[in-house]
Image (spheres, helix red, strand yellow):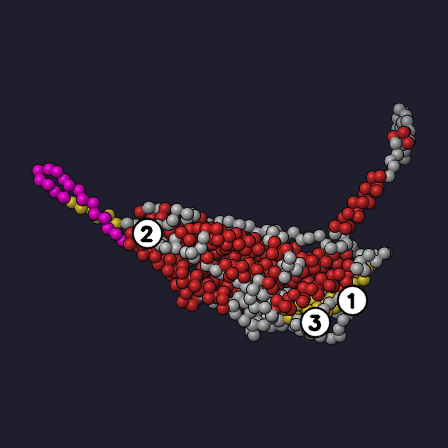
Amino acid sequence: MLPKLISHEFEERSSSDVEGDVSMDGSTSWAISFSDFCNDLTVNKRHVVDIPAATEARATIRSVLKVSKRIEHGRKDYLQLVKVAHEEPYRASAQVLEEYIPQLRGIIECIAHDEIALKSEPQFSWRTTLSANIFNTSPRLSIPGLQADLVFSLLTYAFALSNLARSTVSSLGRYEFDRAITESERKAKDDQLNIVVDFLCRASGIFSYIADTVIPQWENQIKGRSAGFEHPPELCREVNNALAKMALADAQTVAIRKYLSKAAFDSNIAPGPPLPSSHPSPGLIAKMHLECVSLYSSARSLVKTVGTRKRPPSAPDSTGEVSTDLRRYLADQEALHSALAHKWLGVEAGEKGGTQRGGDAVGFMTWSKKELQELKDGRLSINIARGGDKGVKDQLKQKIVDELETVNVFHKYYKKANDSVFYITFIDIGASFDTRSIQIHFQPIPSQANLQAKVPAGIMAIAAKPYVPRPPAFGPGSVAHVQAQTELLDLDDDKPRSSPTDIPSPATIGTYAGAGAYF
């Protein structure tokens, strides 16, 4: 089950707006005005409308976040934050994030090209939802720079996509195990899973874009001015790379479910061996799970590095560490996918390996059974949403119980086959009849170390979708700016050109020594 990632709350202030250390709660109606710290330097003041438009777009985001904060469940709070172009219901949703980000990028580009100047350094106050905190609350930090606001806006966009994916999966239920569902209904729900995979692949691309592009720009922007300021997890490249890997692993998890949908339905009446003809390759499914193990493990390693950094003395407690809930989610998912990978490796050995791999089948099933039992008995501690998300935990616990039951069925079947003794009777025809029987045993069960050597590398079935930002809403790089530059070039092309006869001929150069050379 996918985790719920809380969208950020924010408040803002310019250093010229307040005196001293003023803190404004995110639930108030305070809002930033770009006009307070942006000065239009263009001769004709062509950005006099653009700057207030950016303020308005940001105010809309703030209003939507305040509303969504009060809504615990449902898809409408996330739909207000994102627009999905290929799905008609989503086209009508408010495009607040997709509208504000180009506005913010317009201001950033205008500042970079000296069309807008900053009267003072803007300070953006955000609640850091990924930070560890002993009271499980979101500490609020004042962060300098427009690029920081871009980071948190993009994070909110990616979180909205992730949460929309999660709520879509929750709404579908365990439809592939519904014996009454029709083929067309099942395929329609499969299509919804494809949309979920798309959401998560897009979110992964956004997290990578933040880590690779925006955070380096922000770090360069505040270089030399960040003494005593500790980067919250959201402004660390490692954390965003970890989130990118987590979103990709979540997407592959959904892709595996969709891949197994038909076979799961066909196995409703008699789960376990033999597999239905509609079942995909167990070895391929195992490799997909193994890749999820690798992604979750890498993500967990990345978030661990954040907590080992030296903190400035003035930094608030726990702001630099990633929340325990996120770290536990990554650890639990890594363990779950490891168990499922070993399950499918066992099925591959039992169904495709013949009698020669009977011991491998039992060994992998025993390994998987042990891992699932550990998760069931207490290792499972998923609590990704602030304050707890009982629905996520309950559904995941149910999945572990179901998987454990399935593994027990396969384990019993393969163990019985491997423990069986066959008697082959030979009749020796000679002076007198003589019968002899030979006992043939199946393969011994390998140790876990020997089984580990037989575990293949993982494989990706999907890929992250690179985030390509929309052009700035105004200023350099915007559609209007590019069109204006193109029109200027066209005007230059329309100017009359000098004909070849108008060009004076070069002076004739003599043939004497040193002709044409002047000193």
Q: CA distance from mark 1 to mark 2?
A: 73 Å
Which region of the structure is painted magenta?
419-435
User: How far apart are labels 3 and 1 at the CA level?
Assistant: 17 Å
Image quadrant occupied by the C terminus: top right
Relative depth, front residue between 205 and 224: 205
Q: Residue at x 37, y 57 (%)?
A: 406
* Residue type (three-letter) at the residue carrying disc 2: Gly
Q: Is residue 428 magenta?
A: yes
Q: What's the magenta bit mostly, secondary-structure-wise?
A: strand
Above or below, 426 against 316 in this view is above
Q: Position of residue 138 (x, y in %)?
A: 60, 70
Q: Mark 2 to mark 3: distance in Å?
A: 67 Å
Residue at position x 39%, y 53% from top?
A: 267
Among numbered discs 1 and 2, the one appearing first in the sequence: 1
> Which residue is disc 2 drawn over?
359
Q: Report the residue at 63% width, 68% height from top.
A: 67
The residue tagged 1 is 36
Of residues 205 and 132, the one drawn nearer to the viewer in this rendering: 205
Query: Is any part of residue 448 visible from this angle?
Result: no
Residue 365 pos. (x, y %): 36, 56
Question: Furthest residue to the left?
Answer: 431
Instruction: State the image coordinates of residue 292 (x, y, percent, origin top left).
Output: 49, 55
Amino acid residing under circle 3: Ser
Foreground tag (2 vs 3): 3
Q: Residue 357 appears at what percent x and percent y? A: 34, 48
User: From the viewer's perspective, is the residue at label 3 or at label 1 nearer?
Assistant: 3
Disc 2 secondary structure class? helix
Q: Residues within 10 Å of mark 3 (few under 14, many from 20)?
A: few
Which badge, 2 or 3, comes first in the chain's sequence?
Answer: 3
Other residues around mark 1 within 10 Å, as few (<14) / some (14–19) / many (≥20): some
Which residue lies under the disc numbered 3? 29
